[in-house]
Image (tube, rainbow, N blue to C red):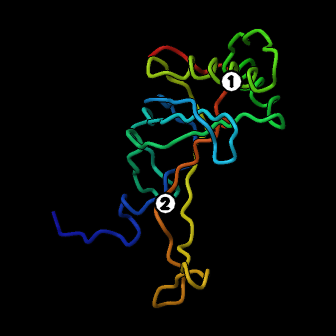
Amino acid sequence: MAYQRPLVGSNPSNALFPRGVYTVHPVKSSLGTSQKGSPMLTIELEVLAPEVVTDGNGVQVKTAGRKGTMYIVGTEKNLINLVDLAAVTLGLPLPPQAPTLEDDINAILRTIEGALTPANVFMMNLSAKRDELVDPVTQQPVLDNAGQPILGRERLDFNSFAILPNTIRAL
């Protein structure tokens, strides 16, 4: 077989995680407080399947094993979103209404945490992006020799709104 140089742009380690539906697995979770003092559920997630995906350029990207974090913050403003996430998306029975807003938010977050455990998997739409690196002094994008912005590490978007309804199941 004749020698074939790899094609420019075909390095899988440079390919962006392809947008699509993935099976994810909660690795661990913790209930805490956001920087603004609101109750917050932090869930570390890992992609289980598919193991490899071909992106739009024909590059095979290893997706299984990729990890990220989902933050679910409870506030009065997004209480309806928490209720829908628990009852509609995850199909969970809601806890009885608590006497205070903060107690009710915490009860709903604990219900969600109880379902998103390492014993379960669910499906969600995932995408990724790379942000431009910014000079901390000038707050301007860092440019390469060709004048193009240099992009930072890839960041997977594990958004609770991207969980597909009624897909949670035991592992």
Residue located 58% across and 42% down the image: 158
Left-right relation of 78 to 66? right
The correct choice, above or below, for 170 with respect to 14 in the image is above
Residue located 49% across and 21% down the image: 117
Q: Is mark 2 in CB contact (under 8 Å) with mark 1?
A: no
Give the position of the N terminus as an image quadrant.
bottom left
- In x, y percent, where is residue 167? 60, 21
Q: Sort mark 1 into few (<14), some (14-19) or many (20+) by Cα contacts within 10 Å.
A: many
Q: Nearer the viewer, residue 39 or 88?
A: 39
The amino acid pointed to by label 2 is Asn
Q: Nearer the viewer, residue 113 or 152?
A: 113
Give the position of the C terminus as an image quadrant.
top left
Q: Sort mark 2 into few (<14), some (14-19) or many (20+) by Cα contacts within 10 Å.
A: few
**Mark linked to residue 90:** none
The amino acid pointed to by label 1 is Asn
Left-right relation of 106 to 149? right
Q: Residue furthest left?
A: 1
Q: Nearer the viewer, residue 154 or 19?
A: 154
**Mark linked to residue 57:** 2
Residue for badge 1: 106
Q: Tell me which corner region of the image, top left, top right, bottom left or bottom right, holds residue 76.
A: top right
Label 2: element kind: loop
Return the disc, 2 or 1, that comes first in the chain's sequence: 2
Q: CA distance from mark 2 to mark 1?
A: 45 Å
Label 1: element kind: helix
